[in-house]
Image (cartoon, helix red, strand yellow):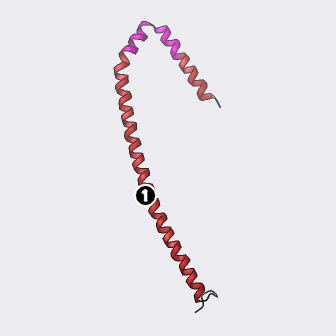
Amino acid sequence: MRFFGRGPKDMRKVAAKFDRLQSDLETLREDAKQLASGVGEMADSAVHAAGRAYNDAGKWTDGNISSVRDSVSDQPLTAILVSLGAGALLGALFLRR
């Protein structure tokens, strides 16, 4: 039987190519599943690390806020000048193109 002008030998080649394609697609599907699982685990780990860093930063600021308040109360003009300098530096960095 001829299919699009192909003989039985050609049809076996087409069938073999089709089988290889199905096998490759199955392998690709498995690889994609493993990749998605790995990305999910990494994202979960990153969220937990960010949460820990946030909590640690909160504890550090809570522990140091009184010394900062004391410094600003003792030297208000110096605190204003330092704040202006830091703002100018950050502004220059962010406006740089």
Q: Please check the rendered image and state whether residue 81 is part of the magenta-colored stretch, yes or no.
A: yes
In the rendered view, tell whether residue 41 sits above or below residue 57.
below
Q: Outermost residue toward the top?
A: 74
Q: Is residue 58 left or right of residue 9?
A: left
- Residue 44 position, x and y percent, is 38, 46
Q: Nearer the viewer, residue 94 or 32?
A: 32
- Residue 89 position, x and y percent, is 57, 21
Q: Is residue 79 left or right of residue 8?
A: left
- Residue 18 position, x and y percent, is 54, 76
What residue appears at the point 41 percent right and 42 percent down from the top-left corner? 46
- The quarter of the rendered structure image containing the N terminus is bottom right
Magenta stretch in the rendered image: 67-83
| Most common secondary structure along the magenta stretch | helix
- The quarter of the rendered structure image containing the C terminus is top right
Q: Please check the rendered image and state whether residue 72 is part of the magenta-colored stretch, yes or no.
A: yes
Q: Nearer the viewer, residue 15 or 97?
A: 15
Q: Amino acid at mark 1?
A: Gln
In the rendered view, tell whether residue 27 sits above or below residue 60.
below
In the rendered view, tell whether residue 25 sits above or below residue 14.
above
Q: Is residue 52 left or right of residue 5?
A: left
Q: Secondary structure at mark 1?
A: helix
Residue for badge 1: 34
